Amino acid sequence: MSMQYYQHFPVLSIMILFLGAFLVALFHKSRFMRTFITSVAVIGSFAMMIALIKPVMLNGEIITYWLGGRVPDGGYAIGIALEVDAVSLFFGILVSLAVLLSGLYSFRYTKQDDARDKFFTLYLMLAGGVMGIVLSGDLFNIYVMLEVMTFAAVALTAYRSWNPNAREAAFKYLVVGSIGSSSVLLGIALIYANCHTLNLAQISALAMSKMNPSMLLAFALLFVGFGTKAFMVPFHPIAADAHAAAPSSVSVLISGVFTKTGVYGIIRVCYFLFRTMGMPAVQTGVVLIGSVSMFLCVTMALNQHDFKRLLAFHSISQIGYILTSLGLCTALGIAGGLYHAINHTLFKGLLFLTAGAVLYSTGTTKLEKLGGLAKKMPQTAALFMIGAFSISGVPPFNGFVSKWMIYQATYEKAMETGSIGYALVTVLAVVTSVLTLASFVKVGQSVFFGEMPIEYQNVKETPASMLVPMWIMAGLCLATGLLPNLMFKYLLGPATGAVLNSPAYIDSAMGAGYAASQMPDMSLMADPVIVFAGAWKPLSWLLLFVIILAAVALASLMSKKRTSESGAVIDSKHDTFFGGEENTFSQVASGDLFWGFKHNMRKYLGFMSNAHNGITNEYVTWGVVDLAIIIVYCFIFI
Amino acid sequence: MSIDINTILMYLLYALVFPGLLFSSVFGLWLAGVDRKVVARMQKRIGPPIMQPTYDFFKLLGKETIIPANAATTTFMLAPYVGLVSLVVLALFIPVGGFQAFGGMADIVVVLYLLTIPSLSIIFGGSASGNPFAGVGVSRSMVAIMAYELPLILVLLAVSKAVSGNGMLTFSLEGITTYQKLNGSLLFDWRLLPAAVAMLLVIPCEVGSHPFDVGEAETEICEGPLVEYSGAPLAVFKLSHAIKMFVMTALFAALFLGGIATGMLWLDIVIALLICTVVTIICMSFLHAITARLKVEQVFKFFWTVVSGLALVSLILVWIGI
């Protein structure tokens, strides 16, 4: 088969980012060159991913690109391959989109920092590392990229090094994250010892026939390793610290992109390498970890007093949704999980950028210190509300559609297996969703609404160059919520099919028929047909909404309008009502909100805040214990 | 797809007149009037005329709208209208006596989520007013939402499981109505009786009626989120409150008493509306007259233990397949 021009796109989209990183370091003195090179790199990488939609998503091609032309020889894949199927491309698009938008935002956002050249060098290294992971077809290559990504992320976390929290967060990240990195490396070594290859496709074909205790150990190690990158419980505390300290545009990458490599890794390990996802024990395990992450982190988020820490905990909570859904191993579950993955990148990116805008304008993200900013920053407040509605699953925004699919998928699984446990997962997911809503009501009340402290009297709206990427993200939040059919056609349908079709992935790398020759009893894990239990037509809803809104607007236009706004001097008519007392500044503090909830849950919440004591040694212990539990679980049940 | 003018006009009629904007407003305000009258009679008062909420609505429309100096104006002014409109759209999706204007567009999970939009509009509207009373009200309203959401989803899942046979799961309201037409109303299925009771307790909390009206407690926090509202926006919030009574009771009728079929559509609809009224009297007026307002933490505890417990019993009974 002759080489098509687009087959070079995967390698180019990785290279352009790394090349950009070195060029930015080279031209570090020129602000123009820095901006230009970064823009070209992130736009180029995104454009190439978009160009691959047609061949990969619509025509169902799998692009296998052997670096240096070293094709498999003698039945073994010796060379390094990039292999892009619909799953890889799905994550590639998601990654490059987040990199593009937060890159554009960073130009202005980092204005008050020094050493901005190093910021963009590291930024592009991080982006390149992530792209390398999702597009690579070689296990060791993935590990190398994982390390590039991790070190760039650690350095970026500590970027504002004048802030002691940033240095501490980076240290924790490095130490706890190393558990993940070492287990991935050990897992790869065990696989190499058993299968004598590092090519994902070939391992996938050989793993089942070479199944032995050391391979099982490798599975557990890889699962925990990628789980660390996704910050699944109990690795979540490091994420909270890192997000809170890192610059917001980096938080977008850590939350929207970095964690997705963990999800991607878990998909590759469970659905491709070992194909263990069909086993009920693995499904139960993954769903359990997902549900615990989902619920535990949302309750932690409710307890936070810092805008960005709160978002960080939500980010893991949403990853919990994704893992839960992917762990079901049904077509609807996979589609719902992937949908939530892209939605999470969009709305969480948007929320981190609004948090960044608040930090940029006011210099703090402490919920207690802020208030009433909607009067000074109306656009940022509107953007925040779009993000908050999306993450809490308010129709018609995107978070709703994916959550709706996840509820159906978990409940269908419960029907299918006859186990009420999965039904309780559905309930837990709904409860998590309403708690998510509550914590964003809290942010809204304490940052954008309520009374404004006097020191923010002169706060200005976020600069336009930062607003534009945010509006794009907000628009995408609405569009992905309103147009699920297009999402299925172009992204989710092909990606879901690819997740369930590992033989095609194997054959593309190793030659047609290889999968069948190595795995005579291979079968698809589930039927890749997505069946919905209910109906949701967002466009019809929107149409009805607009019609009725028009009618109401018409009616209110016809009635006589008497609206009275306050003048420059506030008179008693327009002053805040205090029950007749004199008006004093009395913003309801964020910590006092939801007292009725906190009072009832005080034992649980108290236990949780005591457990998250910030001591690195304890977090490492959690991680090691978790690793041990998962290994034991694997040996008992698989 | 060919669209002819008659179909469009018919759908417009559904959306704007029946069961849409006009009907749900009139019927909702009527329900609110019945509620007030019944409460008054139970307290040995004469009570206002049944049309009083309607008069109040028009009176408020004529009043001046004051925008407080501390308010975030856009959110403050838009919130009531967004809440009203989303509630009316929701009313279109719920079958009334087997009549569903817009079928196949939203299932029970969507209904659950669409119900949060009106509540959110009150919360964000109140929040935007910048008043500390509203701040407290916002906090309390949100706790009330957290409180009822758990039992409500348990009820919905129990109903959904009860009507789903042969491994085919259905969340759709049509599916639930059809099942009841064939097999009788779910209220008479003893396994779902606890769920029905739970639903009857969820309704007053969702609507914000005594004893669960912690968010708007007039005597404590001056109607909380509504404290700074006046004129037309306040009228719209009052109207939304009334429509919510209709929507919630109609949802109860559709979920638990959807099996009533006389063969005549108009009669079915009239019966469904009567059921709405009876449910309003039972779960709102009756509770209102005999109870005092609970504390915030009591509301939360009550819903997460007693009401959720009832709903969970139904869910388990349905699951073990007795």
Image: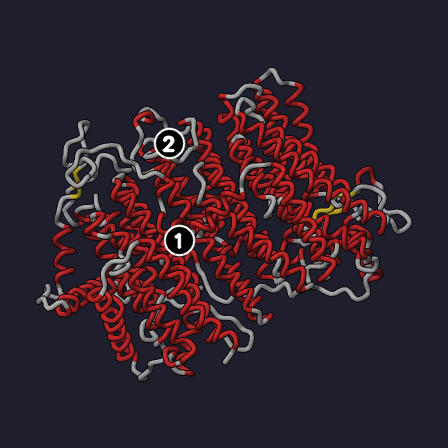
User: Quick one: label 2, few (<14), some, or many (20+) residues within 10 Å?
Assistant: some
- Viewer-side label of 1, 2: 1
Q: How is the image coloured?
A: secondary structure
Tell me how many marks there are. 2
- The residue pinned by badge 2 equals A369
Residue A95 visible at all: yes
User: What x and y, as percent, mark residue A335?
Assistant: 58, 57
Q: Label 1 to label 2, Cα distance in Å? A: 26 Å
Task: Label 2: state its secondary structure.
Answer: loop
Foreground residue among A501 and B197: B197
Residue lying farthest to the left in this orientation: B46
Specify whether A535 is left or right of B227: right
Identify which residue is drawn at 54% across, 44% down: A611
In the picture of the structure, the residue carrying the numbered disc 1 is: A600
Residue projecting furthest to the top: A29
Q: Residue at x 60, y 27 (%)?
A: A38
Question: Is residue B40 or residue B258 the one in the foreground?
Answer: B40
Amino acid at dot 2? Lys
Q: Name the one closer to the observer, B276 or A285.
A: A285
Q: Is residue B215 above or below residue B316?
A: above
Q: Quadrant of residue B302?
A: bottom left
Label ID, residue A523: none
Amino acid marked by disc 1: Asn
Depth order, front residue of B31/A31: B31
Q: Chain of mark 2?
A: A
The secondary structure type at the circle numbered 1 is: helix
**Residue A442: percent from left, percent from top:** 38, 43
Q: Is residue B233 left or right of residue A589?
A: left
Q: Residue furthest right?
A: A74
Vertical comparison of B122 with A412: above or below: above
Quadrant in the rendering for residue A613 = top right
